[in-house]
C-alpha cells in the first residue's frame, strides 16, 4: 500500500513550493534534550505501564532529528473484559523517528511512527510546516498525516482487516499582549476500513437466556469523519506564574458531540528550583447514534455498539505536578536537567453504560457504571 | 467519500491564505508588531509554553484518546510525535 495518494502528493508539492519563496530570517529549532519517562495508568480493572524515551539532537541550527521509543505493558480485567472474556496481558511497542528543518522563519517537520502489538499493527507518516510572520507575533502551521493499520484477532488466524486514516491539522498561535498568547487548532480526521474492536460485544434482550440477555459481535460503520477545534490561552500573571485556559469542541459522523474545558496554574518557587503545577479538566460527550447499553433483540439495527468509549459520559480530572530543575556543571556536555512527577486523578461517570457485574437486577436496570483512575508520569529531562 | 474531501478543502483554503500572506502580501501589509521583541520576556518564560514537556504531554493525550470518543486538536503537536 502506498501511504500517500496522488492528491496528497500534489498537496505536499504545493506546500514545498511555498517554502521555496519564503524569506530567510532567524528562528530557532526545539532545544536538544533527552527524556526518560515511566508512565502508569491504573483504574477500572485496567493497568498499563512502561517506559518512554525521547532523544532529540540538532545540527548546525538547521536540522533537528528525534527518536522516541515507547512501551505499554497492559493487564486488563476491565468491565468489558470480565463480562464476556477473561483477563489478559499484552504489550505494545511504539517507535517514532522524525526530522525538523528550519529555513528562515519556516519550520518543517516529518515523522514516521510504527506501533506493534500481538493483534494490531499501525504505521503512520506525518508532514507539517509552520511559519512565523507579522513580526513573529503570529505562527501559522498546517500538517497532514496518513496512517495504515492492520487489525488481527488473537486465536483466529484467518481474521485480518485494514484501516486507513488521514489527519489534517491547522494551528494558529497569536501573541495578544506582552503577557497573553492564544493558540487555535483545527483537526479533521477521516477513517476508512475496519473500525471495530474485534473482541467487543453488544448485549440484547433474550428471553431464552437465564439472565435475560445475550451477547453478539459489535458492528461499526466502515467510515468515520471527525472535526475538533480548540482555543487555548496562556496568561502571565502579575507575579512569575502562568494561567492556562482551554476549550475544545468535537463532533463526528457517528453522532458523538463532545467538549472539554481545562484550567491550569504553573508556579515556580525559584529559591529551591521547583515548579509546581495544578490543573482541573472537565470533559463531556454524547453517545454514538448506534450505541445502546441493551438492544431490544439480536441484530436490532445495521450498526451496533456497546463500547463504553462510545457511550454518553463525563470525566473530571484533577492533576498536580512538581518539577525540580538542576544545573549539570558536574556532567560534561549537559546544560541543565529536571526531575518531574505528575499525577492525575480521573473520575468517569457514565450516562447510559450499566454495570452488568451487579447482580439481582432486571436487564437494563443495573446501576450506571463509574470508575476512577490514576495516571502517573515520572521523568527525567536532560538538556544539552 | 464526500465527507473525506472536506478537511482537505479546509486545508487547501488555509494554505492559499497562508501562501497569499507569505508570497508578497506581508510587504504591502507591513503590520508593526504591537509587542516589541524586548517586551517578550514574559512570553519567552518556559512556564508560558503550551507544552513544556512533549513526552509527558503526548502520553496524557494518548490516555484521553484511548478512553474518550473525541480525538484531535490536542495541545502541542498531537499524534505523539515528540516535538514541540
Image (cartoon, rainbow, N blue to C red):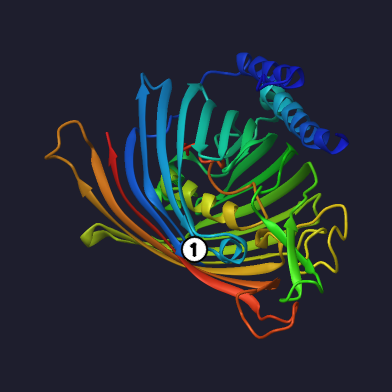
**Visible residue check, residue B50:** yes
Judge the density around disc 1: few (<14), some (14-19), many (≥20) Cα neighbours within 10 Å.
some
Residue at figure coordinates x 40%, y 56% from the top left = A40
Residue at figure coordinates x 58%, y 39% from the top left = B33
Q: Secondary structure at mark 1?
A: strand
| Residue A5: % across, % down | 73, 20
Camera-nearest residue between A92 and A177:
A92
Q: In the picture, which quadrant includes the N terminus of chain B?
A: top right
> Looking at the rendering, which quadrant does residue A268 occupy?
bottom left
Vertical arrangement, residue A21 with respect to residue A311, above or below: above
* Residue pointed to by mark 1: A264
**Visible residue check, residue A141:** no
Residue at figure coordinates x 21%, y 61% from the top left = A272
Camera-nearest residue between A203 and A196:
A203
Q: How many marks?
A: 1
Whether residue A331 sits left or right of residue A207 in the image: it is left
Residue at the far bottom: name it.
A360
Label 1 resides on the chain identified as A
Residue at figure coordinates x 67%, y 54% from the top left = B70
Amino acid at each position: 500500500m502506498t501511504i500517500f495518494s496522488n492528491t496528497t502528493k500534489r498537496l505536499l508539492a504545493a506546500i514545498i513550493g511555498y517554502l521555496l519563496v519564503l524569506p530567510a530570517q532567524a528562528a530557532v529549532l526545539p532545544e536538544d534534550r533527552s527524556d526518560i519517562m515511566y508512565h502508569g495508568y491504573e483504574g477500572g480493572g485496567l493497568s498499563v505501564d512502561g517506559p518512554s524515551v525521547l532523544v532529540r539532537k540538532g545540527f548546525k541550527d538547521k536540522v533537528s532529528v528525534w527518536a522516541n521509543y515507547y512501551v505499554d505493558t497492559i493487564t486488563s480485567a476491565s468491565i468489558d473484559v470480565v463480562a464476556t472474556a477473561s483477563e489478559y496481558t499484552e504489550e505494545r511497542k511504539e517507535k517514532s523517528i522524525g526530522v525538523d528543518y528550519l529555513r528562515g522563519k519556516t519550520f518543517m517537520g516529518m515523522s514516521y511512527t510504527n506501533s506493534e502489538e500481538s493483534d494490531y499493527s499501525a504505521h503512520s507518516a506525518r508532514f507539517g510546516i509552520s511559519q512565523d510572520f507579522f513580526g513573529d507575533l503570529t505562527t501559522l502551521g498546517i500538517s497532514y498525516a496518513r496512517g495504515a493499520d492492520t487489525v488481527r484477532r488473537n486465536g483466529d488466524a484467518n481474521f485480518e482487516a485494514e484501516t486507513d486514516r488521514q489527519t489534517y491539522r491547522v494551528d494558529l498561535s497569536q501573541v495578544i499582549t506582552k503577557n497573553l498568547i492564544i493558540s487555535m487548532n483545527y483537526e479533521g480526521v477521516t477513517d476508512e476500513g475496519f473500525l471495530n474492536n474485534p473482541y467487543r460485544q453488544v448485549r440484547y434482550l433474550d428471553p431464552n437466556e437465564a439472565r435475560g440477555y445475550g451477547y453478539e459481535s459489535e458492528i461499526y460503520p466502515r467510515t468515520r469523519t471527525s472535526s475538533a477545534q480548540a482555543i487555548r490561552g496562556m496568561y502571565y500573571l502579575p507575579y512569575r506564574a502562568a494561567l492556562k485556559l482551554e476549550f475544545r469542541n468535537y463532533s463526528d459522523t457517528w453522532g458523538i458531540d463532545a467538549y472539554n474545558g481545562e484550567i491550569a496554574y504553573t508556579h515556580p518557587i525559584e529559591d529551591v528550583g521547583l515548579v509546581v503545577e495544578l490543573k482541573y479538566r472537565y470533559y463531556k460527550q454524547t453517545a454514538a447514534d448506534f450505541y445502546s447499553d441493551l438492544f431490544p433483540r439480536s441484530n436490532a439495527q445495521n450498526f451496533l455498539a456497546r463500547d463504553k468509549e462510545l457511550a454518553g459520559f463525563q470525566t473530571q480530572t484533577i492533576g498536580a505536578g512538581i518539577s525540580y530543575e538542576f544545573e549539570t556543571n558536574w556532567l560534561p556536555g549537559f546544560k541543565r536537567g529536571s526531575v518531574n512527577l505528575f499525577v492525575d486523578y480521573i473520575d468517569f461517570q457514565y450516562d447510559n453504560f450499566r454495570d452488568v457485574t451487579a447482580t439481582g437486577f432486571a436487564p437494563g436496570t443495573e446501576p450506571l457504571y463509574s470508575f476512577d483512575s490514576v495516571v502517573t508520569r515520572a521523568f527525567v529531562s536532560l538538556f544539552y | 467519500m464526500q465527507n473525506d474531501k472536506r478537511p482537505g478543502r479546509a486545508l487547501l483554503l488555509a494554505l492559499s491564505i497562508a501562501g497569499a500572506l507569505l508570497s508578497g502580501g506581508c510587504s504591502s501589509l507591513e503590520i508593526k508588531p504591537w509587542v516589541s521583541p524586548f517586551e517578550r520576556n514574559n512570553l519567552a518564560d518556559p512556564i508560558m509554553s503550551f507544552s513544556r514537556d512533549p513526552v509527558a504531554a503526548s502520553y496524557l493525550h494518548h490516555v484521553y484518546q484511548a478512553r474518550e470518543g473525541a480525538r484531535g486538536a490536542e495541545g502541542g503537536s498531537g499524534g505523539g510525535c515528540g516535538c514541540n
